[in-house]
Image: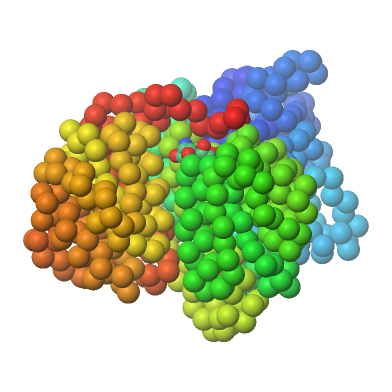
Amino acid sequence: MCGIVGYLGKKDCTKVLLDSLSKLEYRGYDSAGIAVFENDSIKVAKTKGRIAQLEERINHEGGIKGNCGIGHTRWATHGEPSDVNSHPHGDANISIVHNGIIENYSKIKSFLETKGYVFESQTDTETVAKLLDFYYDGDPLNTIKNVLGEIEGSYALGILFKDFPDRIYAVRKDSPLIVGIGDDEAFIASDVPAFLKYTNKYYLLDTNEIVVLSNDGVEIFDKHGAPIEKELMVADWDMEAAEKGGYEHFMLKEINEQPAAINATISPRIKDGMPDLSECGLTQEKLAAYSNIFVVACGTAMHAGLVGKYVIESIGRIPVIVDVASEFRYRNPIVTDKDLVIVVSQSGETADTLEALKLSRKKGADTLAIVNVVGSSIAREADMVIYTHAGPEISVASTKAYSVQIAVFYLLAFELAYAKGAISQEECIRLTKELQSVPATLEIVLKQDELCKYVASTLVNAENLLYIGRGLDYALSMEGSLKLKEISYIHSESYAAGELKHGTISLVTDTMPIIAVATQRDLFDKTVSNAKEVKARGGKVIFVSHSYINVDDDVADYKIGLPTIDDLLMPMVAVVPLQLIAYYTSVLRGNDVDKPRNLAKSVTVE
Ligand code: AGP
């Protein structure tokens, strides 16, 4: 996600825009820029880097004086961080800033090129700027309406038209956009923090609404151009709370961002109901030809690979070897030019993963990176890249990045299985549709916040804890265990439920909680038996399964019921309570949830 701002008033616009952008850097910070009316011309300054670099550039170029303008801080999704890819995009007549993803930008770009347009950036946003120019008929609202009829995807746009100085036009579809209302001044912004210093009053825009800021005031229209009245909201947040969108910690905010992050990641890669990863060069022919697939990563990213392994092997019937990067790179792995090595990394900078990637390339394998940060070292080193669109993940404990990583693995598994003829097109479409239902399903699960908080309260004084599961539940429980360990500092271990009786069950006492994950219905009865085994020895069992399945008191002390989707995709649903339990346990233990002791967000050293 990116941050967009706009200001119209009597203050120094450049100063207000830079200040407002600095409050949105948590939304993206790889480049920034502003466009301001100066003597009725649109003056633009933009740069790769942080707001500070932008301010230096503006001052170096003699400053920009004006009272009306727009600004942007970028989280790259299309095109790596660079001056030319920075926003605003456009020309002397039209300048825009954008937050979101234009899903059909390639088609529009090709059309505009046939009309003689020449593109300079790799962004989807530049396409919108040029489409506005193409449709411009002297009436900004009519121009905007024509463009909105062509573009697909999610967007919040801030737009300046040279012919209408001291006016800001803005549009919202899915990506957040609000209108700050001050004394004799108005703002547009992606989020409240941008203008909270100047006013706490704002209008919330709904999707497909257009707003015009002018010296006559603020006007809001629906997509047909009909004026709309809005309730004036009042933000009662302090600045820090506002940056977290009102959540107490970034981790809780990011857990709640998962539906949107998953949607932003999978939607552009589903065409006519079928997965389509061809954008990264991973064709169905290539997928069908690999002898083995390796997944190499660290921590949570490796756990995403474990889920990927079970799914790809289950329906694609190709061996998947998952390894932690720090082991893979030193065990002289048997990788050949017939293999695909997938490296997974939120930051794209993890040293072990990067070195494992380089080793794989030396051994002649095709390499694919699943990465959240555009233009990161791992993204640049791999033969192919699939970017996740989770937006910046600030909290050290990875949550939404994990969910979007496994979402990509599902798309890859479905496409590979179909390409190999292991599943029919009908089955592939069914599974893809099930994946598309996940964001809405998560909205239901996220409402179990209070139950997870209560369960966490029973864990606060635990010293040791076991997570058990079978199959995909075992893969998922690895992630649940790491989440708890790294932010609550309680020792926990994930264990294959069927393996407990071979030694580890000796640890079980009445002071040891066990979280049993049982979403795989073909293994359900066996996991129930394992839960009974530990309960019979005094263990306190927290049972995570489908809400429609009842379990007796001799199985569980607490039950977290989940909405049911295809078992193959249940890890995407079941991970949420595990994240929330870890989060609340950490909060209740008084820990620094977003910055746990000893940890860093990106481990760029061995
Ligand atoms: C996850 O909660 C941890 N912060 C850590 O395990 C992390 O997943 C790991 O360091 C890998 O980071 P990456 O995804 O940026 O490569």
Residue 525 seen from this side? yes
Residue 40 seen from this side? no
When the figure is inspected, residue 131 is found, relative to residue 278, above or below; the finding is: above
When the figure is inspected, residue 542 is found, relative to residue 212, above or below; the finding is: below
Q: How is the image coloured?
A: rainbow
- In percent of width and height, residue 264 lies at 55, 55
- In percent of width and height, residue 365 lies at 74, 56
Q: Is the C terminus in the top left, top right, bottom left or bottom right quadrant?
A: top right
Q: Residue at x 56, y 31 (%)?
A: 603
Q: Residue at x 34, y 56 (%)?
A: 496
Q: Residue at x 37, y 41 (%)?
A: 483
Q: Quadrant of residue 347?
A: top right
- In percent of width and height, residue 234 lies at 35, 34
Which is more toward the observer, 105 or 76? 76
Q: Is the N terminus in the top left, top right, bottom left or bottom right quadrant?
A: top right
Lateral position of residue 586 relative to residue 76, left or right: left
Q: Which residue ends up furthest to the right in the rendered image?
A: 116
Q: Residue at x 40, y 62 (%)?
A: 472
- In percent of width and height, residue 493 lies at 33, 44
Q: Quadrant of residue 457?
A: top left
